[in-house]
Amino acid sequence: LEPKEEFEHNSLAVDVMRPRRADPALAVLTQEGMTVGEVESTHYSGFPVVVSQESQRLVGFVLRRDLLISIDNARQRQEGVVSASQVVFTEHAPSQAPDAPPPLRLRGILDLSPFTVTDHTPMDITVDIFRKLGLRQCLVTHNGRLLGIITKKDILKHMAQIANRDPDSILFN
Ligand code: ADP
């Protein structure tokens, strides 16, 4: 996203975000109730963290890299972390069965105010914000409900597609 590349096209955030209509739902983590094993078996670079699958209310955003580093660190410090340990992003410790392994508390690695646009935000504005804030991804909402994600690579692919289809509509000056 070089600053000199002007992006002038009338597409909207909803045209660029993932998942697309036919894709599986956005992969989110819940603020409690997931295990270290479940978190380790994910494969996107980052995840919105939500209150619950039902509410989809946004708590923050976490990078997969930070999750893996924290899990590794906890294992090395021998904090009793196993695959069945609960990962918790809440402020307070969760209630757990007395024989459950201790939870791994990771609120510290959450971005509590991830950048968000609405589905109808024009992409030229979104691209401008990506550049100015140096974003790698942003979340997309509709009426406050979490809908999708746009990564920097999604934007670059979208720009390339437009340039192929319709080279006059995008200016690389
Ligand atoms: P990149 O776009 O840099 O390859 P990712 O590996 O995170 O980064 O994303 C790969 C694709 O999956 C992108 O099109 C992105 O929009 C989408 N994506 C990223 N995170 C999620 C997620 N949590 N749930 C669903 N799709 C995602």
Image (tube, rainbow, N blue to C red):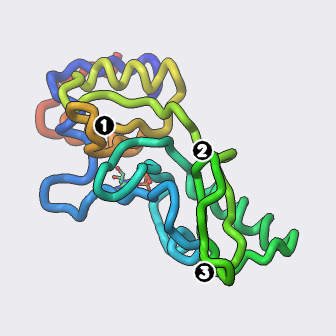
- Residue 109: percent from left, percent from top: 66, 47
Sequence-first disc among 1 and 2: 2
Mark seen at residue 60: none
Sequence-first disc among 2 and 3: 3
Mark 3 residue CB less than 8 A from any atom of ligand 1 = no
- As measured in the structure, the alpha-carbon distance from the residue carrying label 1 to the one carrying label 3 is 32 Å
Q: Residue at x 87, y 69 (%)?
A: 77
Tag in front: 1 or 2:
2
- Residue 110: percent from left, percent from top: 60, 44
Residue in the foreground of this view, choosing between 139 and 173:
139
Residues tagged 1 and 3 counted as in contact (Cβ below 8 A): no
Q: Is residue 119 left or right of residue 101?
A: left
Circle 3 sits in a helix, a strand or a loop, which is it? loop
Residue holding disc 3: 84
Tag in front: 2 or 3:
3
Sequence-first disc among 1 and 3: 3
Q: Which residue reaches farthest bottom?
A: 99
- Residue 76: percent from left, percent from top: 85, 72
Residue type highlighted by circle 2:
Leu
Q: Residue at x 46, y 19 (%)?
A: 3
Question: Would you place residue 57 above or below residue 101 in this image?
Answer: above
Residue type highlighted by circle 3:
Ala
Residue 21 placement: quadrant: bottom left
Residue holding disc 2: 110
